[in-house]
Amino acid sequence: MCRVYGVTRDGYNAWKRRGRSFRSHEDDCLYDVILRLFQESGDLYGSPKITEQMKALGYCISRKRVARIMRENGLVARRALIYRKQPREFHLASVAPNLDIEHLADQVDKVWVGDITYLKVDGEWRYLAVVMDKFSRRIVGWALGKERKAKLVWKAFKKALENRQPGPGLIFHTDRGIEYRACEFTDRLARRGIRQSMNRPSKMNDNAFMESFFANFKAERIHKRPGFETDHALYKAIVHYIDFYNNRRAHSSIQYLSPAEYERKMG
């Protein structure tokens, strides 16, 4: 075997006497911590978030080393693809301009973003409308319904208003879906002095944070189970996930803090 691998007999015997290196033993100890953090996250954290959590616990470790240990032990975070229905254009409905929300969202309750996603209960579609504060990534309102209509998105937005009570000048950004362009919805926003902003045509990245939230929600709570048999079961799963997302889930875009922690830090 020494001849096959091109090593000397003395070299092999010396390696065998030395045993495992200190770094190898250290990797074993680090793996125990990484595995615990990975499992506590519901198998959803990759090496960047695991690294930040370990640093918060006092470990001096690089992302590259965490990634290697996770890769060697088969720890792979879950990911999901988003089902995206092609939007239909209704030329009689109003379209709001695309505002510079990246720079306008410089504190909480300055810019909210919203969207709708599809979920299934016993083989039938349900629709989840969500409102997020763009600055902190916190989910501030949501509503679940059987029909994708303007009253559903208004129900979610009204809940957000009750939870946050924002000051004047609030901007609400969405895609160009007909629900957000319906007079029933736009008139209610206008009466409250809320400005609307919408994606540019065919530019889904204009609302990337909502896309990311739905992708994470489905990867972390929906695709890991066989399905929902009742509306109550789905409703309960949404409640639990949003509580986790707002109060405990680390977000790389806000210094690896949860939205609630980030809001407290930023005052």
Image (cartoon, grey):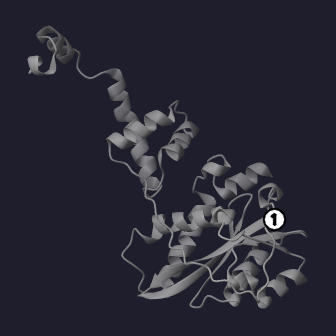
Which element carries disc 1, helix, strand or loop? loop
Considering every residue shown, the one lying at the far top of the view is 10
From where the camera sits, is residue 243 visible?
no
Q: How many marks?
A: 1
| 138 in relation to 160, above or below | above
The picture places residue 180, in percent across and down from the top left corner, at 73, 81
Residue behind mark 1: 99
Q: Residue at x 59, y 68 (%)?
A: 242
Observer-nearest of 99 and 11: 99
Amino acid on which disc 1 is placed? Leu
From where the camera sits, is residue 94 visible?
yes
Observer-nearest of 70 and 206: 206
Instruction: From the viewer's perspective, tell me whether residue 171 is left or right of residue 142.
Output: right
The picture places residue 8, in percent across and down from the top left corner, at 14, 11
| Neighbourhood count class around disc 1 (C-alpha, 10 Å): few under 14, some 14–19, many 20 upward | some
Looking at the rendered image, the quarter that the N terminus falls into is top left
The picture places residue 148, in percent across and down from the top left corner, at 61, 88
Q: Residue at x 81, y 56 (%)?
A: 107
Q: Residue at x 67, y 57 (%)?
A: 259
Q: Say which quarter of the image contains residue 170.
A: bottom right
Instruction: From the viewer's perspective, tell me whether residue 164 is left or right of residue 77.
Output: right
The picture places residue 134, in percent across and down from the top left corner, at 73, 61
| 243 in relation to 64, above or below | below
Q: Say which quarter of the image contains residue 172.
A: bottom right
Q: Residue at x 48, y 52 (%)?
A: 45
| 158 in relation to 98, above or below | below
Instruction: From the viewer's perspective, tell me whether residue 257 is left or right of residue 215.
Output: right
